[in-house]
Structure formats: structure tokens, C-alpha cells
Image (spheres, grey):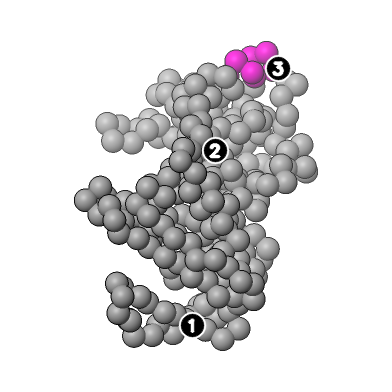
Amino acid sequence: MQRAIDRAYLIEHYGEVWKHARLKGDQYRETDFIAEYPREGGIILDAVRDGAEALLDRIADAIRPVFETATQQAVEQQATMGAQLVQRREYVQGMRENTLTYEQIAENPPPNWANAYSNRSVIKEIDQLVAQITPRQLDGSTVDITLNGNDAHLPFGFTPPIARRFHIIASQRELGPPLIVTARIRSLDRGNRYAKPSAKIENLSSNREVSLHLPRREDCDELHPYHNGEPVRLYVCPIIEALGFDIHGGDLVYLAVVA
């Protein structure tokens, strides 16, 4: 819960959260709540702080859409990442140089990406909290989260089925639209029995180092000639998590080298 509060503070302070964002030393005291003694009636833990109403409203706003979807009896299943990867590769084979560039997307990103990515940073912490009741042997248990901010919020009542569906949504990943990115390859890793192939690239438009996921070991061999410090143009896809993406530092999936 404290980590969810920390993430909400970053959103309120900076307007959004980006990958690897952290509180600075003097910001921690702004997010400290006083925990009161547990009360009877299960495990009831109260935490209070004067002037934190906006933080609590922000947490509630992040939880609500995912919680409301999780209360439905079924969660819509996305196509597998493998199936999406095949579709994206077929797309760039047909579009070639007409594929959108990173610069074009960065200038006009989908309006929900930044907000959804910021919300996800809160949601993933709440997911860890309510995951305590997801084991089947704990059916009948509940987690209730009540947030009293400037606005009136109904309690979020998690039963085990709701908590399981909440986790499915919170951990949902899909591939975004194919892009052309100009990059410099910083490192290549062929992977092993326990880790998939991957790379680190410097996005020359954002000047940020980002992770590039390589679906096949052959992709590492394909990129090896370009691991020479020189710029290379790549077809890639953003990895969308809980409908959000950090346009500056989010992970990408490799599709092909632009011929």
C-alpha cells in the first residue's frame, strides 16, 4: 500500500510516471502515513495523514476502472503475444518504409498511453496487496480498501474471484503498433535455458536506453552485424502494459532491420 501511495505522489507531483521513476530523499516524508493500532473484525488497519486527500483520490481513480472490469463475470481474452507478433511482422513486410516512425508517434501518442501507464504503476502494487486472497484455499476471504480523500469513494471490496480477475487485467500485456526507430545497439544477449534473448538499445530520438526483447535467438544473430556503435533503423513494437506505455523508456519488441 505504501508503494501505491508513493506512485500516486509521483503522478500528482510530475503529472505522470515513467519507467524506473523513484521518490527523491526529501519526498519520502510527503508520503508517510501514520498507522493506527489494528481493530477487531478481521484485520482492520487504518492509516492517516493530513493533507493527503489528493493522493488518495488519485489511487482511487487508478483502481476504479480495473476494479469495475474485474467485478464482471468474464474478462475479455487478448490474442496471444505470439499471434500478435506474426501480425505485426506481416504488417511491416507489406508497409515497409511507410510504417510510422517513432518520431511521428512521439509527437502524437495515443491519448490514453501516459495516463494508463501511470495508473498501472499504482495498480500493480494494489494487485500485490489483494493477491493475498487469491489462493483457492482462501475462498471466502475478502480485502476491502476504503480511501477517504476530497471525494467520496465507495469501498473496493475484493473477493478471491474479483482479485484473480483484477490480476489478469493488471498483468495484461499486448503489442502496440509497429514503428521504425533509429537506434544504436548497446548490448546483445543470446539468452540461455532460463532467460530469453534480449538487447539494450539507445533510442537516438529520445536519447534513452531501452530494453529490446528478441523473440528468437536468430534475432540476436541478425542484429549482431549492427552491434558496431553505428545507427541502425529497426522495425519494433511497443509492449503495452495494462493499456499504457512509457513513450520515452518503455520496452520494445524486435521485428526486423529496416532494409
- Quickly name the residue at label 2: 239
* Kind of residue indicated by mark 2: Ile
Looking at the image, is mark 2 or mark 1 nearer the viewer? 1
- Circle 3 Cα neighbour tier, 10 Å, few/some/many (<14 / 14–19 / ≥20): few
Q: Indicate which label's residue lies in the foreground, 3 or 1.
A: 1
Asked if 36 appears above or below 91 in the picture, the reply is below
Disc on res. 95:
3
Q: Position of residue 195 (x, y in %)?
A: 33, 36
Q: Which mark is residue 35?
A: none
Quadrant holding the N terminus: bottom left
Highlighted range, magenta: 89-96
Residue at mark 2 to residue at mark 1: CA–CA distance:
37 Å
Q: Amino acid at mark 3?
A: Met
* Label pair 2/3, CB-CB below 8 angstroms: no
Is residue 127 shown to the viewer in this render?
Answer: yes
Dot 3 or dot 1, earlier in sequence: 1
Residue holding disc 1: 48
Give the vertical position of 86 relative to 23 (above or below). Answer: above
The residue that appears at 46% across and 54% down in the rendered structure is 124
Is residue 171 rendered to the left or right of residue 108? left
For marks 2 and 1, the one nearer the N-term is 1
- Residue placed most toward the observer, 211 or 11: 11
Which one is in front, 254 or 201?
Answer: 254
Q: Position of residue 188 (x, y in %)?
A: 44, 34
The amino acid type of the residue labelled 1 equals: Val
